[in-house]
Image (cartoon, rainbow, N blue to C red):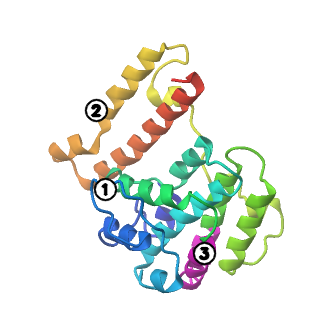
Amino acid sequence: MSFWGKILGGVTGFAMGGPFGAVVGAALGHAADEGTNRPPELDSRPEALARITNRDQLFSIGVIVLSAKLAKTDGAVKREEINAFKRAFRIPLENQREVGLLFDKAREDASGYEAFANRMGEVFADNRAMLEEVMTALHHIARADGPLTRSEATFLARVRRSFKLDEPGGPQSRVPPLSMPREPDPYTVLGIAASATDEEVRLAWRRLIREHHPDGLAARGVPPEQLRRASARMAEINAAWDRVKRERDL
């Protein structure tokens, strides 16, 4: 379960509260039209963010933008940081296009995150526990590719001030060690041995994708809860495949 699912009522993945594509379109300054390759503009003006009145939608957009810009703050965004984002914020398959569009636009540069952090601090002032969970997730994303850098530490400190959270008392309060799961072994996820050939790994990945694809399950009439679990499983399978490809230079 994604960490905000524990806080917002046990929902796995993003709590949409409405058509997510339209909301992402608002954050990007135009509708996220299907099939377009035109780069959108990320609208971080306070008046634009104020138009996003649904708390769940603001939360979803905010964590995507903050995660992407944090990953960018110390240079090129690394695969380890993207995988850490995917583990923290499990994205339903039907929303992956919109989430990817917003993440890619946000990571073009590290600036402009303060407006999103300020807005989240205002709207969620009554839910400090959730803001602390966001900080925990951001810390894990920052550390995914190595020790915390000075630019990452500055970013995190500014977000924390925007959230109006008390300064942490020590390392354990900054990053609760058990709050986030460790990255699972990719070969275990794919159900094969580490000694498998490249082709065997590829075939195992394809088999699992066919088995767990939500579209195929929906066509068979499975219940919504099973579809949500399938989306989470798909994200795990694809993250494992990405890691194997990177390690084997496929």
Give, as a single range, the part of the protein colored magenta: 113-132
Q: Is residue 19 above or below residue 152?
A: below
What residue is at 54 percent from the left and 13 percent from the top?
195
Question: Horizontally, is 64 left or right of 161 in the view?
Answer: left
Question: Horizontally, is 148 left or right of 136 in the view?
Answer: right
What residue is at 52 percent from the left and 69 percent from the top?
62
Closer to the chain start, of discs 3 and 1, is 1
20 or 179, nearer to the observer: 20
Residue 121 shown in magenta: yes
Badge 2 element = helix
Identify residue for label 3: 117
| Residues at marks 3 and 1, CA–CA distance in whole angstroms | 29 Å
Question: Horizontally, is 84 left or right of 200 in the view?
Answer: right
Rendering coords of residue 26 (x, y %): 38, 74
Kindly identify which numbered label has been placed on residue 46.
none
Badge 1 element = loop
Is residue 182 something that shows in the picture? no
Rendering coords of residue 115 (x, y %): 59, 78
